[in-house]
Amino acid sequence: MTKNAPEKPAIAVLGALAYDHITTTQTPFGGSGPGLNCKVSGTTEHLGGCGGNLVHHLAALQHSPLLLSVSGIDHARYQTALGMQNLDLAGIYHDRNAHCASAYIISDPNGQQFTAFHSGPEVLPATWVRHLGSIKSKLAHCRLMLCAPFPPELMLHTMNFVHEHNPTALVIWCPGQFTDQMDAAMLKACSGYSHWLVVNTHEAQHIHTHAPEIFRSNTTVITHGEAAVEVLLSDGREKRYAVEKVSGAVDPTGSGDAFAAGLASQLLRDTEQPLAYLDAAVDAGLQRARHCLMHHGAQPAL
């Protein structure tokens, strides 16, 4: 843990720490991605993973969240970077028998991405719950829980733990790349502990097909790339927010995480009445996403 990390962080962030290997291709993807043979340019390595990306952006917005994640034997470079951001690292479970998560990301000329993700160390739910118990006092003081993509059972156990020990915390669920691996029962179980849902078009379609009732129990924010952000309120109303065209965008990697961080930073202003800051939250999310688009990787290159 960093020396000056706050004893009672206001935000807890669940999500992976990963090393991203990013490259580009000059050939536009087809309907099924890059195909069987894809020529790429030189690869660069960046700090990534949704958990790492979120705390990076929240730190830039003057927050010091508690990070809940898993690291491996090659975590030293990542830990050094996190330590420089005054973050509380007590929530990271260290596995000395496996490597950190990693992602291999290819972007085509149209900004479409193909990602192959290795999720890193595998932690049994019972082991993870014991780890959460070791930091229970910290979690009990968080006013907002941002649940980013993580193995589904661990997402469920984490949100359940927070609900049990900190029932007034506002829970924002971003299931991300795990969404289409979750059946109706798991989707419903996780959503039972969340208040806000943040998904992209593909993820929203999977939920709509398998568990549409989730949209009625959560305030749902759906991003559509360059198209307007859609917000579905639990009372049936809908709102749309135009997305400003970004000129000179460099790399879309991590822009969804940047959006979620900006959104959460404003909802934290009133976790009991977060809809009062809906407009400001979406605006902050879009601003942070635009910032992310202007450089390679979700975080600065190693």
Image (cartoon, rainbow, N blue to C red):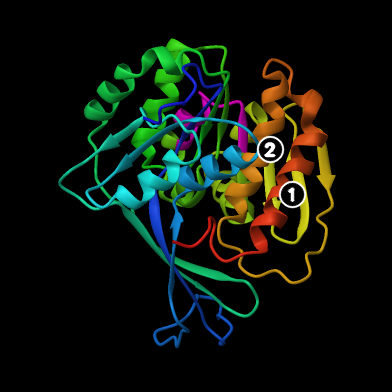
Q: Residue 77, percent across and down?
A: 35, 52
The residue where tag 1 is placed is 286
As drawn, the label of residue 24 is none
Q: Secondary structure at mark 1?
A: helix
Earlier-in-chain disc, 1 versus 2? 2
248 or 183: which is nearer to us? 248
Q: Residue 74, percent across and down?
A: 26, 52
Decide if residue 229 is on the left or right side of residue 173: right
99 or 26: which is nearer to us? 99
The residue type indicated by label 1 comes to: Leu
At x 35%, y 27%, the residue is 90
Q: Residue 148, percent across and down?
A: 49, 40
Q: Residues within 10 Å of mark 1 (few under 14, many from 20)?
A: many
Q: Is residue 117 visible?
A: no
Q: Residue 67, percent across and down?
A: 44, 33
The residue type indicated by label 2 comes to: Leu
Q: Is residue 301 magenta?
A: no
Q: Is residue 192 magenta?
A: yes
Marks 1 and 2 sit apart, C-alpha to C-alpha, by 8 Å
Q: Using the image, determine if residue 113 lies above or below residue 82.
A: below
Q: Secondary structure at mark 2?
A: helix
Q: Using the image, determine if residue 18 lies above or below residue 37.
A: above
Decide if residue 132 is on the left or right side of residue 61: left
Decide if residue 46 is on the left or right side of residue 219: left
Quarter of the image with the C terminus is bottom left
Q: What is the span of residues highlighted in magenta in the rendered image? A: 187-197
Q: Residues within 10 Å of mark 2 (few under 14, many from 20)?
A: many
Q: Using the image, determine if residue 216 lies above or below residue 252.
A: above
> In the figure, residue 143 lies in which quadrant?
top right
The residue where tag 2 is placed is 263
